Image: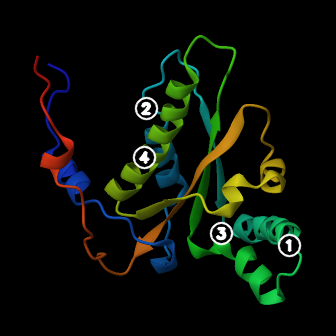
Amino acid sequence: MYPENSLEDAVQRLIERRTVKVIHMLEPGPSDEQMQKILQAAIRVPDHGKLAPWRFIEFSGDARTAFGEVLGRCFQTQKPDATQAQIAHEQARFERAPNVIAVISRVKYEHKIPVWEQTLSAGAACQNLLVAANLMGFTAQWLTEWYAYDKGVDEALGLVEGERVAGYLYIGSAAERPQERARAELSEVHSHWSN
C-alpha cells in the first residue's frame, strides 16, 4: 500500500494551521538546509504536463535590504509625492521576516496544458511552502501587496513574458500562537453530488 503509513499529526497541524502576520514574525528563519527542504516540498505539487510552471526567488540576509532599494524606487515612481517616511516604510517590507520567497508563476501559453491549470499549480506551490514551513516549526504568510503588481519590480526580478508574481511568502518564527479567526463551516462548503 502507498503511502505506507498515515501522518495524522501532520493532518492535525493542517487543521490547526493559522497565519501569523508578517509584522509579528521574529528570527530565526529556516537555515539553508531547512529552506532547501521547504522548497523541495514546494515543487511536489500537481504539475500537469511536467511544465514546472513556477520558479522561486529567495531573499535572505542583506538581499532583503538591497531589494528594499528597488521597492523604494518603484514606490516613489508610483507615488511621486510620497514622504521620506513612506518610502522608508516600503523599503523595509522584506525586512519584516527572516526569509522571503517570491513565487513566480510562469505560464506557457502555447502549450496544450490550459493556462488555468498552470496558474493553479503555482498557487499550489505557494500553499506547499506555507504548509512545509509550518510543519518544520516556522510560520509563514502569503502576501501580494502592491509590489506583486508593479512593472518596475517585475523588471528587477527579471520576469519575462508569461511570468508574474503569484505571491511573496514571508517565513519566520512566532513568539506565540495566533488567535483563531472565523472560518467557513464545513457543512456550508461541502456537499455530496447525487442525481
Name the residue: 76% across, 55% down. Answer: 150
The amino acid pointed to by label 2 is Val
Q: Which mark is residue 94?
A: 3
Q: Nearer the viewer, residue 124 or 37?
A: 124
Q: Which mark is residue 45?
A: 2
The amino acid pointed to by label 1 is Gln
Return the x and y of residue 177 as percentages of the image width and height: 29, 76
Pick the quarter of the image with the N terminus. top left
The answer to whether the residue labelled 3 contacts the one labelled 1, judged by CB atoms less than 8 Å apart, is no
| Marks 4 and 3, how far apart at CA | 20 Å
Q: Name the residue tied to disc 1.
A: 76
Return the x and y of residue 153 as percentages of the image width and height: 79, 55
Pick the quarter of the image with the C terminus. top left
Return the x and y of residue 121 as percentages of the image width and height: 49, 32
Residue 92 lies, with reference to residue 155, above or below; the image says: below
Q: Nearer the viewer, residue 26 or 149?
A: 149
Helix, strand or loop at mark 3? helix
The answer to whether the residue labelled 1 contacts the one labelled 4, judged by CB atoms less than 8 Å apart, is no
The answer to whether the residue labelled 2 contacts the one labelled 1, judged by CB atoms less than 8 Å apart, is no
Return the x and y of residue 102 as percentages of the image width and height: 63, 51
Q: Which mark is residue 127?
A: 4
The answer to whether the residue labelled 3 contacts the one labelled 2, judged by CB atoms less than 8 Å apart, is no
Name the residue: 17% across, 53% down. Answer: 12
Q: Earlier in the sequence, mark 4 or mark 2?
A: 2
The amino acid pointed to by label 4 is Gln
Q: Quadrant of residue 88?
A: bottom right
Helix, strand or loop at mark 1? helix
